[in-house]
């Protein structure tokens, strides 16, 4: 007649968001399915105030770790981009304007003495 028990490695493997973990656990319970994390089995099968507190704390820690890890990854990616740019000699600071047209002016084809456009190789 279906499953009656779901084993998960740890509460954060079931859900890394506190709200999802609590609502998911409540939903499974209403369906008559026991959710049992192998790292904290007693706290998910009991309905004592201590068990509820431990479930909430474990869920909050999992959510914090997920948010912290994603923030670390984003800042690490930004640092990696900066290191690559510095290694390639790319500067993020604006350079002063070139005087006299600079290198860009030489890339524009100029008319020759006969009135034809010059070919730039």
Image (cartoon, rainbow, N blue to C red):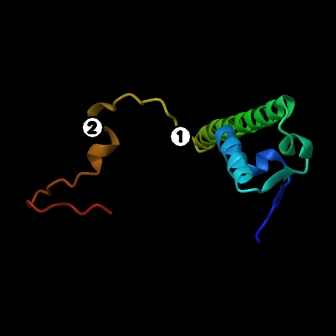
In this view of the protein, can residue 15 be seen by the observer? no
Q: Exactly how many numbered labels are in the figure?
A: 2
Mark 1 or mark 2, which is nearer to you? Answer: 1
Q: Label 2 crowding class (10 Å Cα cut-off): few <14, some 14-19, many 20+?
A: few
Question: Which residue, as the protein is rendered here, is positioned at the far bottom?
Answer: 1
Which element is circle 2 on? helix
| 116 or 47, nearer to the observer | 47
Tag of residue 5: none
Residue with the mark numbered 2: 101
Identified at 24% across, 63% down, the residue is: 119
Which element is circle 1 on? loop
**In this picture, is 24 found above or below 90?**
below
| 11 or 25, nearer to the observer | 25
Identified at 62% across, 39% down, the residue is: 74
Identified at 38% across, 28% down, the residue is: 96
- Across and down, in percent, residue 4 comes to 81, 62
Residue with the mark numbered 1: 90
Which quadrant of the view contains residue 68?
Answer: top right
Q: Quadrant of the N terminus?
A: bottom right
- Across and down, in percent, residue 49 comes to 83, 29
Left or right: residue 53 versus residue 119 is right
Identified at 76% across, 56% down, the residue is: 32
**In this picture, is 86 found above or below 120?**
above
In primary-sequence order, the first of circles 1 and 2 is: 1
**In this picture, is 120 found above or below 49?**
below
| 89 or 17, nearer to the observer | 17
């Amino acid at each position: 007649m279906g499953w009656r028990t779901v084993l998960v490695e740890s509460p954060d493997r079931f859900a890394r968001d506190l709200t999802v973990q609590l609502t998911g656990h409540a939903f499974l319970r209403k369906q008559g399915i026991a959710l049992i994390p192998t790292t904290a089995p007693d706290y998910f099968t009991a309905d004592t105030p201590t068990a509820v507190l431990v479930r909430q704390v474990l869920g909050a820690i999992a959510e914090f770790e997920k948010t912290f890890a994603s923030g670390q990854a984003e800042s690490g990616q930004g640092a990696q981009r900066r290191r690559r740019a510095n290694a390639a000699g790319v500067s993020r600071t604006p350079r002063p304007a070139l005087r006299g047209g600079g290198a860009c002016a030489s890339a524009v084809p100029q008319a020759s003495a006969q009135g034809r456009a010059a070919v730039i190789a």
